[in-house]
């Protein structure tokens, strides 16, 4: 009898992690099943490292930054797991059929699934922050433009925007280049402060650190338009001189414009009936099931509504998701394992290569600890065991 399919769409933090966990701990519950993992790229990467990694290869060991996905799955029997380099085009959750475009031959393939995990994450406006096919060329283009850049505008006062500003500031102006910066770097946010997840005092400290590396923070104004309109979002206009118009009526002419104003969930292949107003999959916040889709369909990570998009939330949810999948596959009548998001103040934001602000589980962390935990290499030190499955 052929094995039934557990289809996992998305092969980054959520998708690769749940694949490892099921294969390691599924036991008899997965005896008659195979896992098919679909990923839009053949490699996974530590995406949080992009703000520093995009500037120069010298800052990271590339063998640790980028990891081959099929190589991580060779430890399992061939009949238990298959990796497909491809993109989901459509999922019919009622008929339980997924249509996948394979990137190795550009052919469409249909997969009948018994169980589905949606872990497709979210896409950034800028290809500089992506693990997509444009990233390599985007980084090359940015690096070529940096030596001659005089003005840089970054849109977005969240952690990614702040980290990009800090990294570029230190790289171009030096650790103490704020008094006479070589390059004018402007960070624009529509909020009344940067880093809204953290307490105001930490946001204020972050602004002081940015000032030391020559970054000016403009708060309370939106970027209403750019000319050209695709500046910063398309390879052809990644480093094109841009007029950035603000809601205040003023404008800035930038040699480089980098939008870091949030992400867009990768969920267009799903029925709109399964999505919320923000286009994330409407997910049961405790069981991680997609209740409206019927049995044995789940979602995790930035594409799901269960928790605030953050890597630590994904990793905390993996054991819960796996336990409920295994329970559902085995037909056990035991109680569900329940996920509860830790909503305490938790966010670490490096600013340059020696400073940072942050808090963990509600506790403020000193700059040195933010550096030690995240700022040294933006979590790359944590991903070896994660990508290989040893963590699980």
Image (cartoon, rainbow, N blue to C red):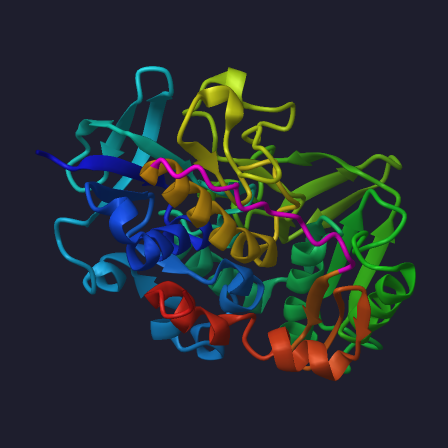
Rendered position, 371 above or below 328: below
Q: Which picture quadrant has residue 74? A: bottom left
Q: Judge whether residue 114 can be spotted in this image.
A: yes
Q: Where is residue 386 in the image (x, y as percent from the top left)?
A: 42, 66
Q: In this view, does 172 lie to the left or right of 113?
A: right
Work out whether residue 305 or residue 108 is closer to the camera in this orientation and state it.
Answer: 305
Q: Is residue 391 magenta?
A: no
Magenta: predominant secondary structure element? loop
What residue is shown at x 8% (from left), y 33% (from top)?
A: 1
Q: Is the C terminus in the top left, top right, bottom left or bottom right quadrant?
A: bottom left
Q: In this view, does 11 lie to the left or right of 215?
A: left
- Total labels: the figure holds 0
What residue is shown at x 55% (from left), y 37% (from top)?
A: 304
Work out whether residue 376 or residue 23 is closer to the camera in this orientation and state it.
Answer: 23
Work out whether residue 286 or residue 39 is closer to the camera in this orientation and state it.
Answer: 286
Q: Judge whether residue 175 can be spotted in this image.
A: no
Work out whether residue 79 or residue 165 is closer to the camera in this orientation and state it.
Answer: 79
What residue is shown at x 85% (from left), y 41% (from top)?
A: 221
Q: Where is residue 348 in the image (x, y as percent from the top left)?
A: 70, 66
Q: Is residue 333 magenta?
A: yes
Q: Which picture quadrant has residue 350? A: bottom right
Q: Where is residue 2 in the image (x, y as percent from the top left)?
A: 10, 34
Q: Residue furthest left?
A: 1
Q: Give the range drawn in magenta.
A: 331-345
Rendered position, 220 above or below 203: above
Q: In this view, does 126 lie to the left or right of 103?
A: right
Q: Which residue lies furthest to the front in this view?
A: 333
Q: Position of residue 389 (x, y in %)?
A: 35, 65
């Amino acid at each position: 009898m052929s094995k039934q399919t557990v289809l996992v769409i998305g092969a980054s933090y959520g998708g690769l992690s749940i694949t490892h966990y099921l294969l390691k701990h599924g036991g008899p519950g997965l005896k008659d099943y195979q896992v098919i993992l679909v990923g839009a790229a053949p490699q996974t990467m530590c995406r949080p490292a992009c703000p520093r990694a995009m500037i120069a290869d010298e800052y990271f060991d590339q063998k640790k930054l980028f990891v081959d996905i099929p190589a991580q799955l060779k430890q399992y029997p061939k009949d238990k797991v298959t990796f497909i380099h491809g993109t989901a085009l459509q999922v019919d959750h009622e008929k339980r059929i997924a249509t996948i475009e394979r990137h190795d031959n550009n052919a469409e393939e249909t997969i009948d699934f018994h169980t589905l995990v949606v872990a497709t994450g979210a896409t950034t406006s800028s290809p500089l922050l992506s693990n997509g096919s444009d990233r390599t060329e985007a980084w090359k283009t940015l690096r070529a433009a940096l030596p001659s850049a005089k003005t840089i505008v970054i849109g977005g006062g969240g952690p990614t925007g702040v980290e990009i500003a800090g990294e570029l500031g230190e790289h171009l102006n030096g650790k103490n280049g704020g008094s006479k910066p070589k390059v004018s770097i402007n960070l624009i946010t529509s909020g009344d402060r940067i880093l809204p997840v953290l307490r105001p005092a930490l946001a204020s400290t972050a602004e002081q650190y940015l000032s030391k590396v020559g970054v000016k923070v403009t708060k309370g104004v939106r970027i209403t338009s750019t000319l050209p309109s695709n500046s910063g979002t398309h390879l052809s206009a990644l480093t094109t001189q841009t007029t950035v118009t603000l809601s205040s009526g003023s404008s800035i002419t930038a040699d480089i414009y980098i939008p870091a104003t949030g992400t867009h969930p990768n969920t267009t292949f799903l029925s709109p009936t399964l999505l919320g107003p923000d286009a994330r999959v409407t997910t049961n916040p405790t069981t991680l099931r997609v209740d409206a889709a019927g049995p044995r369909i789940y979602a995790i990570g930035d594409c799901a509504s269960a928790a605030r998009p953050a890597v630590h939330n994904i990793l905390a949810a993996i054991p819960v998701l796996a336990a409920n999948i295994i329970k559902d596959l085995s037909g056990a009548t035991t109680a569900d394992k329940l996920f509860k998001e830790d909503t305490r103040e938790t966010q670490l934001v490096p600013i340059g290569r020696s400073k940072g602000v942050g808090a963990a589980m509600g506790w403020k962390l000193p700059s040195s600890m933010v550096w030690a935990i995240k700022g040294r290499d933006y979590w790359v030190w944590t991903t070896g065991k994660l990508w290989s499955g040893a963590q699980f």
